[in-house]
Image (spheres, coloured by chain):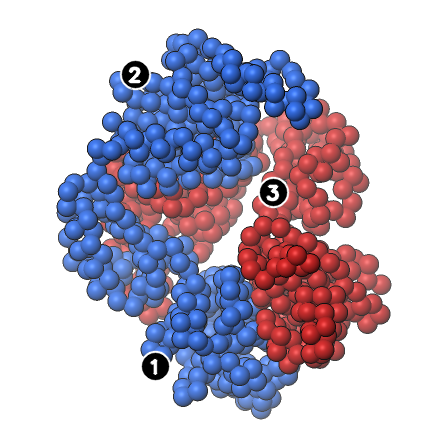
Chain colours: A blue, B red
Amino acid sequence: MIDKAIILSTGDELITGRVVDTNSAAIADRLFSAGVEVAAILKVGDDREKLLWAFHQARDLGDLVIGTGGLGPTADDLTTELVAEFLDRKLKQDEQVAAALKRRFETRGIAWTANNLKQAQFPEGSTIIRNPLGTAPGFLVSLGEGKTLIWLSGVPQEMMAMLDETVMPWIQQQRTEAPQISACTFKIHGLTESKLDDILKPLDLGSEARLSFRAHYPDLSLHLTVKGGRETQRIFGDLREQIRKLLGTYIYAEGDITLEGVIGQLLLEKQLTLALAESCTGGYLSHRITRIAGSSAYYYGGAVTYSNDAKTRFLGVRSTTLEQHGAVSREAALEMSSGIRDRTGASIGLSVTGIAGPSGGTPEKPVGTVWISIAQSNRHEARLFQFHGERERIILGTSQAALNWLRTVLLEWG
Amino acid sequence: MIDKAIILSTGDELITGRVVDTNSAAIADRLFSAGVEVAAILKVGDDREKLLWAFHQARDLGDLVIGTGGLGPTADDLTTELVAEFLDRKLKQDEQVAAALKRRFETRGIAWTANNLKQAQFPEGSTIIRNPLGTAPGFLVSLGEGKTLIWLSGVPQEMMAMLDETVMPWIQQQRTEAPQISACTFKIHGLTESKLDDILKPLDLGSEARLSFRAHYPDLSLHLTVKGGRETQRIFGDLREQIRKLLGTYIYAEGDITLEGVIGQLLLEKQLTLALAESCTGGYLSHRITRIAGSSAYYYGGAVTYSNDAKTRFLGVRSTTLEQHGAVSREAALEMSSGIRDRTGASIGLSVTGIAGPSGGTPEKPVGTVWISIAQSNRHEARLFQFHGERERIILGTSQAALNWLRTVLLEWG
């Protein structure tokens, strides 16, 4: 029975920081969706002692071990022979794999060297896992006590192909009897982590449900998982409903959609168009809107009016406004949003003007002071926000606040 | 003496595959550059037993343990109390941290809840590590036998700030007796990894030098490290000189500076101003220019002319040009760059128009077709580029190509 997995990622490139390991996250994602818990992820370099240590730990901790890397033909590729040593088995050449390897080299006109045969050798008793995209097949071998080791190529594309073609179907088959998992993700804006925690206190999670948060500024997401028995679906549905009620419009999306994705859907649905006038966000808002495929259907374009001259030239902001109130003011923000709306004919004009820092702040208008304004046909409003932290963080936070206000405007749209 | 490190990454989001762990690679990279070997990287979820197992393993294997994650205020943030339990120490509230936390909440007008005080508690005997970007400070605590545990925030930006501001200087200090390492990073544009490899073939690295590449699209960086003996400085200087000669202007920077940072310096130096007209990059170029602090000194602003109407209205592109040649054409790009330059009075007008996809491609102009144009007083030119891949990748690649062209224009500027 497969319940608990350990993932091993191997290779010197991982422990020297030259490469970000995406393999372990991809495997973890697939296993999680299949209801298999990942107890730990271990990464070690191409080193005999470290690899043997990792094999031992993995067998102790899990009943399924999935490893990647070290299946190549060169001297630093140690995996296969060390697995054989660890299991006290001999290496055995698979003649079918050897013949296929030779053919592959011949058809591509690449010189065949003896060390290439290394990739046709496997610990005795292994089941070979086909690699549809590369030269190194993987293998599946018993660790005893009902435990299994699966080893795959470390090349991400090859690994994914082997995982999806062979490994996941095998796991599903082993787990036909196993309890299922239900999970969903809520994307949230306008709450701190601790406030969120507070609001969710009334929830009774019982023994099978679990909540986890993730803050990746300016995003905050909440993940609900229910594992287990016959009642899973009902418990999951109840909890999801309760969370929706407790958080209301703090939830801007369910699932993996971004805030700009939600806004795109709303604009399309209501057949509205948007134009932007950005100062302190310097084009970042526009970038967020346009990174959504198909955004040209609802996005007219906009002006990045970084200088005062640009605010006047592109948006018609009066120079007296800039002189009397400054570029970071309610008045300037209002003229910017109506200016971009009037000049473009878009349904909604949104403007942002503020001080992203690190310089430019004053006691009255410290770094992080931001005015955001929205102009529609029957409504024209500006709001003051105060952000904190470094320049990049202020830009990010401003873009999130502006998009979230736009979302609420669109939700209320008649 | 710090020689061997273990990195711990913790959090449910890592073992369920929802997030790719970039923290461990970033820490490994810094440690490698400082000459500290990373023996293993361990990742576990927010789970008592797993965390304690990881602490034990880490202390057994290394003399320095660097961990991230689980310092938040919510119930699933277990790190601090478990470290205290593991070391058999009490938790102690740091009044300075507590007061700073309260002030932070007050100035931002956020409600203060009791669980926020969790972030002011540390295992007795800890040294607190300042978090310049967030609420959760880290800590450094002895593991006995000359071993040390360092724990940092799991939020990548915060982690990096704490690592660079406090942890790496501390490690350097501990290692004053250790063999020195000389290292530098070259940032490169316009070469594939294999072409770069080819160009660098003539280099004789000997036994002490090491070259590593990192491709993080659209960036490619080359890292030179020389470890060891008396001759380190001379070998390092020689190799750095040879690399500079071999790569010439393919190197756009040395060190951690970005391409937009290099451009900012050049514009300031030459006292020039820039205005942008973006179509397919949708504001991303403008965002890159303005994320550099002080960019208002040389950036006038720009127009994101996503629709044809915007190209005409904001830039004066003739509608006959758009009808006859299309918005993605040499002619449109040229009119866009001169339009933005003429209307703003900036020294340089740069325009971008292309097809970011996934839709909008034709056999003649497939997805990824991009025209970039630069207008100066005595020069007006457009160039055709072909990018590949997904929308986000095309936008990224376009922005990098545009900025790199601008860099060479600025280098040649009289």
Q: Is residue A180 left or right of residue B210?
A: left
Q: Chain of mark 2?
A: A
Q: Chain of mark 3?
A: B
Residue B210 place in picture, x, y as percent: 65, 30
Asked if residue B171 can be seen in this view, the reply is no
- Pointer 1: residues within 10 angstroms few (<14), some, or many (20+)? few
Which residue is labeled 1 in the image?
A: A414
Q: Which element is circle 1 on?
A: loop
Q: For the residues marked 1 and 3, what is the alpha-carbon distance in whole angstroms?
A: 49 Å
Which mark, by number, is residue B215? 3
Q: Chain of mark 1?
A: A
Which residue is labeled 2 in the image?
A: A144
Relative height, residue B41 to residue A306 (above, below): above
Asked if residue B71 can be seen in this view, the reply is yes
Have a look at marks 1 and 3 and say if they share a chain: no
Residue furthest to the bottom: A320
- Type of amino acid at the residue the image marks with label 3: Ala
Nearest to the eye among marks 1 and 2: give it: 1
| A10, B182: nearer the viewer | A10
Have a look at marks 1 and 2 and say if they share a chain: yes
Write the residue at 16% across / 58% down: A202
User: Of callouts 1 and 2, which one flags the residue occurring earlier in the amino acid sequence?
Assistant: 2
Q: Are marks 3 and 2 in contact (CB under 8 Å)?
A: no
- Type of amino acid at the residue the image marks with label 1: Gly
Write the residue at 42% across / 27% down: A67
- Pointer 2: residues within 10 angstroms few (<14), some, or many (20+)? few
Relative height, residue A288 to residue B387 (above, below): below
Q: For the residues marked 1 and 2, what is the alpha-carbon distance in whole angstroms?
A: 65 Å
Residue B340 lies in quadrant: bottom right
Residue B96 place in picture, x, y as percent: 34, 55
Relative height, residue B136 to residue A313 (above, below): above
- Type of amino acid at the residue the image marks with label 2: Gly
